[in-house]
Image: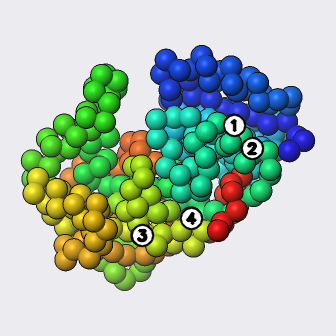
Amino acid sequence: MDQPTCVIFNPAAKGGKAERLREQLAALGEGVVVRETAGPGDATELAACAVGQGFRTVVAAGGDGTVNEVVNGLAGAPVDLGVLPVGTVNVFALDLGIPIDMQKAWDVIRTGRVRHVDLAKANEHYWVQMAGVGFDAQIVEETDAEARKNLGPLSYVLTAALVAGRVPPRLTITAGSETQIEGCFVLLGNGRYYGGPYEIFRGGRLDDGLLDVYVFQRMSHFDVLRYINGVIFGDHDRLPDVKVLRARRVTVECAERVPVEVDGELQGYAPVTFTVEGARLRVLAPPVD
């Protein structure tokens, strides 16, 4: 890799470890320009600026939210995306087989091996790994930053318990042009993993041109625990009240105000149309086995 590279770094991604990460990024080598985000949306602006300045490689250094913002700044431009998974969670890097160790991940970027992966959209907003309507998005919306800081993953568990105790919304899901079913919440995957090392979308691939859609038709405390148990034992997709679809276009509608999340970040409310563009994103990643 002999061309200048722009690294977009989210210093909030590792909290108190940010200074050490700054030093590591500064030592990556000549031709590396590091730009830090100061708040939500900054990574999108910085990525768009990098494209305008002629950078051919733009690296997202952070978690899934940072990757999502950078991808939206690239907006399908003929630029290579690199990923340094230094954030709390980076499921996209996991699915691509990118090492969690920064130096090893940087070595992957330096080799310049491009993998063409699918680029998904929720209405007009790009996403790369996972999305949801209803339950998980409600948890994202209602878990505030202070709770996440003080309680970590437990904050999401507590919010989930509250959300699961409510009367669930009734969603109408249309996949393709014909298939229409109802459910309480929906998870969509561009790849295999969701929320961490959990292979929710078994058989999903980042380059198959399709979205994997799981429609959950119940949402009580008992049902949520049953679904989680199914994920643990690998049979959630065989439960009678979990409907599995695969499509290039999926629309989710509801009469209520139901939130939507993409790559772990809140992204508006239903109705929402999900689409996927095959092999649209150029990612520097290890070769597929």
Q: Identify the image quadrant of the C terminus.
A: bottom right
Q: Amino acid at mark 3?
A: Arg
- Please rate how many residues cluster around mark 4, counting C-alpha atoms within 10 Å: few if below 14, some from 14 to 19, many from 20: many
Q: CA distance from mark 2 to mark 1?
A: 6 Å
Instruction: Report the residue marked by disc 1.
Output: 103
Apparent side of residue 202 relative to residue 172 in the rendered image (left or right): right
Residue lying furthest bottom: 178
Q: Nearer the viewer, mark 3 or mark 4?
A: 3
Residue 41 is situated, as x and y percent measured from the top left of the image, at 54, 32
Q: Amino acid at mark 1?
A: Gln
Residue found 26% across the figure and 45% down from its top: 138
Q: Nearer the viewer, mark 4 or mark 2?
A: 2
Instruction: Report the residue marked by disc 4.
Output: 206
Instruction: Report the residue marked by disc 2.
Output: 107
Residue 186 can be seen, yes or no: yes
Helix, strand or loop for disc 2: helix
Dot 1 and dot 3 residues touching (CB under 8 Å)? no
- Please rate how many residues cluster around mark 2, counting C-alpha atoms within 10 Å: few if below 14, some from 14 to 19, many from 20: some
Dot 2 and dot 1 residues touching (CB under 8 Å)? yes
Apparent side of residue 284 relative to residue 215 in the rendered image (left or right): right
The answer to which of marks 2 and 3 sits earlier in the sequence is 2
**What is the number of the mark on residue 202?**
3
Q: CA distance from mark 4 to mark 1?
A: 24 Å
